[in-house]
Amino acid sequence: MQSAEHHTSLFISIGEAARLVGVSPATLRAWERRGLFTTTRSPAGYRRFTLTDIERLQRIQRSSGREEIAGERDEEPLPGRQEEADAPSERARTPPVPWGSHLRDQRLQRGLSLRQAAAFTGLSASFISGIERGLANPSVAALQKLTAAYGVSIVDLVEGAVAARGRLVRLTDRQRYESADGATMDQLNFGNHLMELHLFTVEPGAGTGGPFHHEGEEFIMMLEGILRVSIDSLEHYVLEPGDVLYFQSFHRHEWVNPGPTPAVFLGVNTPRTF
């Protein structure tokens, strides 16, 4: 008989795991990058935790990231753990884009001071400075406001950091951005195209971090979970798997995952202004 922890209904999302451990999702991602633990992933690419994983994370948290962590990193890998850590989708994925340095370059190319950039975006100068120095991680809405102020798109920043892609973009070719608010965005196409394609994975309670707007038109196709979308604070929609929402992007829009599990959706925008 299989143990309870292997039953798929007991897989725990990163948002739920963070609440159980008493840390933020960003902290769990940082621990994983440091090699303190590994997790399995769903076919859509988001992390799945078991009860055993939660117990291990609680030990890491109790150790305050020092003595017990150092000892655990010296342990021999558990059976099956090395294969999981070396899975092709994780080993070969393109490293995250250094957003801060690229945004700083864009600001300086336009001769803007931090105060001027703050005036254009509505963000504080200290927050923009923190982003540029890698000390702060912008939400989806904040990132879009900065790129709009500099006259570029998120795709432009990505393409300045990765090699050119052909027609086919495999799972390991995607460029990933993890926002401060628990929303992960995978870039699905590269090059001079009319459409921008992103796969979003949104943890429970996470979202855009506020409303934003830009040129063009876009649609959302819901793949997993549920998503609440607001347009101009007047229209409100709850999307379920299979639903498609189409709207003009100049409307101020935002979204959040109100459900208990990660929400996954395909977002397509045209032209390249996001």
Image (spheres, rainbow, N blue to C red):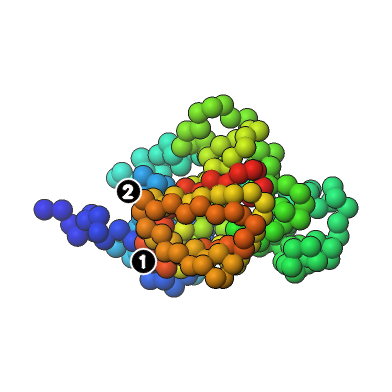
As drawn, the label of residue 78 is 2
> What's the residue type where badge 2 is placed?
Leu
- Closer mark to the observer between disc 2 and disc 1: 1
Give the residue number, with chain letter if any, for mark 1: 260
x and y, in percent, of residue 133 in the image: 73, 57
Q: Secondary structure at mark 1?
A: loop
Question: Is the residue marked by circle 1 packed among few (<14), some (14-19), or many (20+) residues within 10 Å?
Answer: some
Q: Nearer the viewer, residue 38 or 139?
A: 139
Question: Is the residue marked by circle 2 packed among few (<14), some (14-19), or many (20+) residues within 10 Å?
Answer: few
Q: Is residue 48 left or right of residue 33?
A: left
Q: Secondary structure at mark 2?
A: loop
Task: Answer with mark 2 or mark 1, whichever residue precedes in sequence.
Answer: 2
Q: Is residue 39 in view from this perspective?
A: no
x and y, in percent, of residue 215 in the image: 67, 51
Q: Is residue 253 left or right of residue 127?
A: left
Q: Residue at 58% x, 46% y: name it.
A: 269
> What's the residue type where badge 1 is placed?
Pro
Reply above or below: 241 against 155: below
Name the residue at the left extreme. Answer: 1
Q: Is residue 52 left or right of residue 85?
A: left
Q: Nearer the viewer, residue 79 or 222?
A: 222
Q: Residue at 49% x, 63% y: name it.
A: 229
